[in-house]
Image: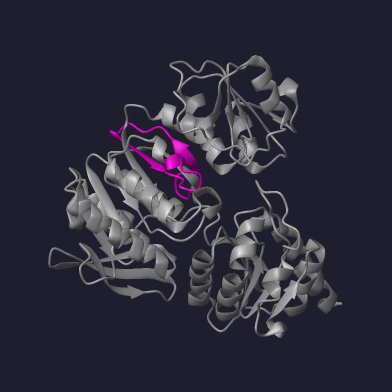
Amino acid sequence: MIKPDLTLVLPESLGRLHFVGIGGSGMSGIARMFHAKGYSVTGSDRSHSDTVQSLVDLGIRVAIGHDAAHVGDADTLVVTGALWLDNPEYQEALRRGLPVLHRSQALAWLVRGERLVAVAGAHGKSTSTGMLVTALRALDRDPSFVNGAVIQGTGTSAAWGTGDLFVVEADESDGSFLLYDVAVALVTNIDTDHLDHYGDEKALEEAFATFAVRATELVVLSADDPATRRLAVSLRESAVGARILTFGESADADVRLVEIGDSGPVGYRVSIAGHEYSGHLAIPGRHNALNAAGVIAVLVGLGFTPDEAVPSLDGFAGTQRRFESHGLADGVRLYDDYAHHPTEVAAALQTARSVVGDGRVIAIHQPHLFSRTQAMAAEFADVYERGADHTIVLDVYGAREDPIPGVTGARVVERFANASVVDYRPDWQAAADRVAEIARAGDIVMTLSCGDVYRIIPQVRAALELRSVGDAG
């Protein structure tokens, strides 16, 4: 894993850029932004994908696989944090003495001098960023943006706008959200995660405090999350120059959710300065009403009236890999979700439950990171056992980590109290076949992970359709 050097002084000129791991959700958006500004951009990725194809369609040359020769005549290398240190393109850049920027540093270079709105938090960052971009477009502010996921309705995760605001999803996992000069900071929540980087919860909260205190105009914080409540108190006591607003269901929230209807697409009411306003979203999920409240607080803080802010979210159609529908197979509804932390999994399962009706929710869980699986196996088992009717567990997607002896998907399965509602199927075809055995028409089958578990969906579909052929025969 390559971590960003937060002390690195960014070069004045980047010249020709080569992106290693260009197909990633964050990397592809940044590459797209540089290309749109006329920079020479090339890249490489380990496999072809729809994202890679979209870059190729723009005229960006992308090599499949990693080789030192792919660096070509690049002046600067941009890398993803998921890259291993022995990557041949990374090693070639070091050999040549080329500047090597983590993707967050490339983004920091890109947004220099912009009026930056940064969305951070343990959960809900991509969705909140997408909501904010959608709302600002509806309000004729046309922001520039870089998100960690494709925003439905825009068809892209990043684009230049004509307005004065630049909206970014700010990643806290490696501390890189501290690289940005922020005008407006939105913190959705602070949850225990990424302790492999921070060491303990105190250091994690201190990083969020540093992020928030640097905002020059506005800080928006959850009023429901204990850590963000502590942060709000600290900021007010230190008399920071930025305005502070809070959102959530708590009685003292500046934008308070007073009602949430979460049966299907979300309807909600918010109270602002003693007046109530009704809104609705085109997507399901109680947690999305909370995300909407945070975005409304940002919009109010930017000077929009509640009458303008609330309906500006009506057109938000979601973000890619957040309860994303993949259609029907033999009467079974297929969905994918990026959830990879117990809190996110619980929210995703609740969303599925809100729309499944009389059907059942069958989850396919791909544990993400060996360290997270080791630390949170029991928590994952608990949320799946409570939220899903049946769970199929795959093996760990290690991403940037080396394996930890004894840590596999079986560790999660062993924590279930009721062994009859869970299966360990490290082989993907066996997992797809197990879905076909147990799923019924009307059920929801949902993959959950920020790894590559979405790639199993064609196998699940094929297994279900083969079952229907067998039944017809």
As displayed, is residue 394 above or below residue 212?
A: below
Residue at horizontal 69 percent and vertical 55 percent from the top? 397
* 162 inside magenta stretch: yes
**Residue 222 in the image: above or below residue 423:** above
**Residue 44 lies in magenta, yes or no?**
no
Residue 391 position, x and y percent, is: 67, 74
The residue sitting at 72% across, 84% down in the picture is: 420
245 vs 447, left or right, is left
Which residue occupies 27% across, 41% down? 215
The picture quadrant where one finds residue 466 is bottom right
Q: Residue furthest right?
A: 473
Q: Which residues are magenta?
A: 151-177
Q: Quadrant of residue 241?
A: top left
How many numbered dots are placed on residues in this image?
Answer: 0
The image quadrant that residue 67 belongs to is top right
Q: Is residue 176 above or below residue 254?
A: above
Q: Looking at the image, can residue 34 be seen? A: yes
- Find residue 194 and report its horizontal and vertical position in percent: 52, 53
Residue 442 position in % (x across, y down)? 62, 78
- In percent of width and height, residue 446 lies at 62, 67
Q: Quadrant of the C terminus?
A: bottom right
> Farthest residue toward the left?
274
452 relative to 104 in the view: left or right: right
